[in-house]
């Protein structure tokens, strides 16, 4: 957020809602629903809106899609023991839900792709291989290419900023 040499790409409430609907139509078209999918909201402080909405939009036969959230390192942090221990704890509670299901990793903004790269390897190492990824916004130079993208942007030129977001120390 706060690198002011780039133009602010302000994501309004209406933009967010529109992209969530766009992505949900694609997911439903491709057969994702609450009977066969678990939503993992990645970076809950930024992605909870889309994670919650998709869980409800993928409802089928009155059942809301199963899901949970994981916190990931900020850009000025790494996947250290603290984050890995927390992820291990989350997986010990919710990991059983992934068996026999499609795993849908969901992020509001994929900037560098490092968190998806790490989580993909982490889940594969634990026998989870039916993994799909959603990015409401994905940086064109992200090292990880998501399966479902609402919109692309260029992080070198644009500073992705959501309507609900406030400046914080991790983005300095």
Image: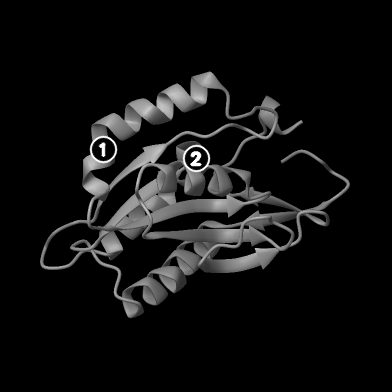
Per the image, label 2 sits on a secondary structure element best described as: loop
Q: Quadrant of the N terminus?
A: top right
Residue 102's mark? none
Badge 1 is on which residue? 94
User: Who's the residue at 34% across and 80% down the image?
Assistant: 29
Is the residue 37 above or below the residue 150 in the image? above
- Position of residue 140 in the picture relative to residue 124 (left or right): right
Label 1 vs label 2, nearer the camera: 1
Considering depth in this image, is 33 or 117 the residue closer to the camera?
A: 117
**Residue positioned 76% across, 38% down in the render:** 2
Residue 145 in the image: x percent, y percent?
60, 62
Using the image, determine if residue 78 lies above or below residue 4. Answer: above
Quadrant position of the C terminus in the picture:
top right
Q: Is residue 108 above or below residue 20?
A: above
Apparent side of residue 169 relative to residue 40 in the rendered image (left or right): right
The residue that label 2 is drawn on is 43
The reply to whether residue 48 is in sight is no
Q: Residue furthest right?
A: 5
């Amino acid at each position: 957020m706060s690198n002011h040499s780039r133009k602010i790409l302000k994501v309004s409430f209406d933009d967010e809602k529109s992209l969530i609907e766009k992505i949900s139509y694609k997911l439903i078209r491709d057969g994702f629903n609450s009977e066969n999918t678990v939503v993992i909201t990645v970076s809950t402080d930024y992605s909870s809106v889309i994670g919650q909405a998709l869980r409800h939009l993928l409802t089928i036969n009155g059942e809301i899609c199963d899901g949970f959230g994981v916190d990931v390192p900020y850009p000025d942090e790494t996947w250290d023991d603290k984050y890995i221990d927390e992820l291990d704890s989350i997986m010990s509670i919710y990991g059983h839900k992934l068996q026999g299901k499609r795993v849908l990793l969901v992020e509001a903004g994929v900037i560098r792709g490092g968190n998806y790269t790490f989580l993909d390897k982490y889940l594969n190492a634990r026998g989870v291989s039916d993994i799909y990824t959603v990015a409401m916004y994905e940086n064109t130079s992200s090292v990880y290419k998501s399966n479902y993208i609402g919109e692309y942007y260029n992080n070198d030129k644009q500073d992705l900023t959501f309507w609900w977001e406030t400046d914080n120390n991790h983005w300095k």
